[in-house]
Structures are given as C-alpha cells and as structure tokens.
Amino acid sequence: MFLASSAKPIDNNLRDLVNEIEVQSPGLSVLAARQFRYSLCQTHVEVTIKEPRQFNVLEEFIIRAGIELDSPPTADELASVLGLDPIFVRSTIATLQKLQTLEVTSPITVTPEGRLFYEKGTVPQPPYSEKIYAVVDPLGGKLTFHSEPLNDTVVNLPELAEFVTIDNTITDISSFSLEELQQNIQASGLALHVPEDGKIVISCKVIAPTKKIWKTISLFVLFDALENKLNIQLRKGKQILKSESNWLEALEAEGKMSLQALYKLSDETISFERKATLNQKNAEIEARLEKIQQKALETARLASAEQKKINLSGTVVQLRDGQIPQAFSEVLNSAQHQILIYSPWVSQKVVDEQFLLLLQTLANRGVWILIGHGIARRQEDEDKPIPAPVEEKLRAVKTPDGLPGIQVFWLGNSHVKEVIVDGKIYLCGVHSWLSYGGDDLPRGESVYKVTIPHQVQEAYEFLANRFKNHAQKLWENAVQNRDTQLATDTLCMWGAIGMEEMALTAIQQNNWLELLPVWLNVVCHGLKSKKVSGDSGSFRTALSLLDQLPTEAAFIKSLRQGWRKVIGAIATNNPQQALNLLSDEVWHEFVRLAIAQPTLNTPEQFIAAHTPSQNMPKQSQKRKNK
C-alpha cells in the first residue's frame, strides 16, 4: 500500500489536488507537495512607437521623384514641374525628412526606410510613447509586458530561492537588446509592436525602479511507475510549468537541489513508495504478459513432436532481434479485416513510403487499421509526440470509398507495444513497432507471437475497449459541434471494431440521417473483407429509415450510391440474402428515392445490375417480405 497522505510531507491546502492527481492517474504516487513563494521583478517602462499613415498626393510625387527619376530634382525644380509654390513643396520635404523618409540633402534622396514605407503606400508618423510594465520571471527566464501592474500581495510562505539557486541576472531590463524587447512585447499581445502593419517599437526606457512582486508556486515530487522514475513538477495552480520542472529535475540530478532539504524526504520513503507504486503498475497488462512469457518458456521446453499437437490450439513463440521486423511484416500482410496497433512512439524512420504502401494495400482489400500511440498521461506532456507530417501521411490512406483507412490518435498512459491482427494473432514485447531505428545490429529485443485464442482475446478486449472509449469521446464532441468530419472518423472507428449496429443506433438517436451514406460505406468496407454479414439486422434497420428521407435531401445522391454498393456487395457473397432485403415496402422506397433506376423493373434486375456475374435467384422465386 502507499503511505497515507497524512504521513507524507504534503501541505494541507494541496491535499485535494494530490488526491485528484492520484485518482486520475493510477500508478502515480505523489511523494511530497509543498507551496513556496518566489519573486517576479516588475519595472515601469516607457516605449516609443512609430507607425505609418497613408501618404498624400504631394508626398507620393516627391518620393516617386526621388526613387524613379535618374536625376532626382531639387525642391524648387519639382515645384516648377508640378506648378506649385516652392515654399509648399519645401515644407512637405522638410516634414518627410523629419520622419526619416528623405535624406537631409538636395536633390531629393529617399532613405532605405522611406523606400520600405513607400512600397506599402505609407509614410511614418511622428513617434509617440506608451507606459507599460515589464515583468521578468527569473524562474522561467521569461520577460512579459503588461498594460497594468501586477497585484502586490503579501505571501507568507518559505522562499524557493532559499533552497534553489535562481539566476537573477536577467532582472535588469536594460540588459535586453531592442530586438529582444520588441519580440517580447509582440509575444505579450499588447499590439504595440506589429511589424507587418508597420507599427514598430523604436526604444524602451525605465521610468521607475524595479519592484518585487511575490507569487505562490507549488512543488510536487511524484513517482511515475510507468517510466519507473521520480518526477518533479512545478505548478501554478493546476498548470504544470513544464520547462521549469525539467530545469529542477536537472538540478536534482546534478545534486544542486536537495529533496531532503525541501521536504525532509528520505531515501527510505522514496524507496518504499517506489516499490508500492510499482506493484500497481499496469496490473492487468503485466499479468497478461507474465502468462504469455510463462507459456513461451513451456513451449520452448517441449519436443518438436509435442509442439505439433500444441499448434492445434495455438502457441506462444519468442522472436528476437532480426526475426521481429520480418514477423511484423508477415503478420500485417496476413490481415483480412482488422489491425490494432499500440506503439508509444511513431517515427518517420518506420512510417516510410514502403510501409505506407503496405497499409494502403491492406485498406484497399477491406482491412481497417487502428493505431494508438503515446506514453505520457497527458498529451501535452509527451516528450516525443508523433511528427505532424507522419500523422498526415497515415491519415491520407483511404479506403476505395474515400473513407479514412487508418485511424491514428493519442491514447497515452501505456508503455506496452502491441499488435493484434484479426483477433487471432497477438504480438507483444519491448519492440517499438512504429519507431524502432531500423538498424540490423542485435539490440537484445524480444517479442512474443501469440496465437492461443483466450490470451489473444484478453489482449484484444483490453485494447479494443481503449479504442471504443476514445470513439465515444469523439462522437460526443462531434454531436456537440455537429462536426461531420469528426463523426465520420468515429463511424469508421466503430466499424473497425465491429460496432456497426451501435454506429447506426447513434445516428438514429441523434437524428443525424445525413450520415447514413457514410455508414453505408463503412459497412460496405466490412462486407468486402467478409467481417460484416449480409444477414446483419442492422441492414433492415437502415432500410426502415428510408421512408423518413425526402427526395430532395442534399445527401440523396451519395445515399443512392451507398445502397447500390451495399446490395451489390451482399449479393456478391449471397444473392438470396440481398433479394430477401428488398421487400415490397423497401422496393417502393428504392423507386421513390431513385435508388433503383426506372429501367430496372424488379429487385432481381436491380441486384443483377449492381453485382458482378452471379447465379441470381430466378424472378419467379418467392421473396420474403419483411
């Protein structure tokens, strides 16, 4: 058991948050949690800003003369050409010179800055000033700017700087270059420095002494069984400060920060919690893997003659190093209708053009592919998230009907690497399926290939349930936002794990009948791989919805195509099943909605027109009216 929360060095006002962390993340133990104060440095500053305005006609003529004429004129020469009073032209030129658009020379000479403004049809206005507040956070090494001062409150807590050396050398605002100040002002969202609009901060000066502003921060020490290591988390409220936390972990690793001094947290306490937490580590998965390992050892001890008998009821075979990629490829190629993959990390090294071609081939023949990834408990905490180009390439794999052939998404919170094909073959072990380096050197990796039905089923139920839970969240989000693309992804995921009937029920319950063509394409994919049976009750349910559809519905065209493909796919395997679906009532709706063409007078002719050469039932054969 873990130590009771009361026996740990945890501040009273952090106990609710500690309980929340441990409840939401089984296997994660908070060893200590304490609040500290630390100071921000706030400085009142004045920034000078220059921004443009549209030039007038005379200004445009003057600047153009300086840019376009081979021999730029003097002020008087230009006044003569324009027929204007020279005093008026000289006055305008003097104004442009003050704005640093023209050089203080004669003839007219445009400055480089003037040329930039001219290209945008503007000239700079006289600079003006704004008073703002620069706030330096020494803990994060960050500079931000605010239009109003931060609240100055009394914080009666231990000072973090007494335990951790914090670099205060950056507190002097004058140590920043103008470019750094401009970048930080822009990042602070004050709209004072907007280069794309020509609005530029040209200077910044301190107008009042720097002032300390005290803030509260919480420091947590956690043991993560998933990665079998201690983590240090720095939080503002519930927000985890990731870069600052990493910095503190580095200090602790270098011996520059003492957990003993911070919390009186002894090595014995840490050791006790480590053991207690590891006992909780992925208990269900670990128990299953232990069974598999034991079975592999038993298999290895059996003589070859006995092995043949075991093959009848399935085996566990241990694969090592170079055997693993070959087995992975062979198992994927054997898929008939479904592949589930869990790989904590996904890299471009593995998901190359050859691998993508394999996945596209599988999708073309009716195989659904679900890929889960992630090892951290929260997606934003992933150290090695899936690269966006890799995810984009995976999502680009489509079924022949244009549906997503691969669903790839973050599930997280698992270090186990698993592959399950058709619910019959299970690969598991330490090999990172979608992120290994691809080298040929032995690295001591081992993987178990399992075909024992009940062990494969245990693994399948666990992983499929994770996908199912994720699909439910996607669907709720899709319904809330009426997001058709998100709904399509969910229907495909449900189809991949054999939940076509649930998908249809969800469409009905949410009165989202325009998704029916998507559902038809999903089940057609399943019919192609023979995972979906033509006598499924969901087809009769879907057909019963036809009388609710108006002929002018925007999705009728795709609905017509969907039903034609579905009936043809059913008839390809069993023509009589297709014919049984087309009762008199259904046939009436097929004709009303123009699913059946006018030239096809009977269901038999309709089926024949949308089915490859088959032995169709004779028209005289009595059909079932259901």
Image: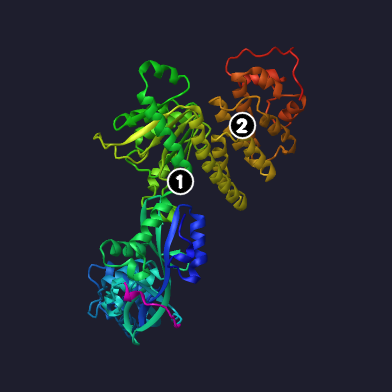
Residue nearest the observer in this picture, 418 or 8: 8
In three-dimensional space, the C-alpha distance between marks 1 and 2, rounded to whole angstroms, equals 43 Å
Q: Is residue 34 above or below residue 475?
A: below
Give SS at disc 2: helix
| Residue 255 shows in this picture | yes
Per the image, is 160 magenta? yes
Give the quarter of the figure containing the C terminus.
Answer: top right
Q: Does 73 appear in magenta?
A: no
User: Which of the numbered marks, if any, corresponds to residue 562?
Assistant: 2
Task: Residue 409: give x, y in percent of width and height.
Answer: 47, 45
Give the mark toward the camera: 1 or 2: 1
Res 282 label? 1
- Kindly identify the amino acid type of the residue bearing the numbered disc 1: Asn
> Which range of residues does the magenta coloring cover?
152-163
- Residue 62 lies, with reference to residue 575, above or below; the image says below
Q: Position of residue 210 (x, y in %)?
A: 34, 84
Question: Does residue 140 appear left or right of residue 396 in this picture?
Answer: left
Determine which quarter of the picture holds residue 425: top left
Left or right of residue 566: residue 41: left
Toward the viewer: 33 or 40?
A: 33
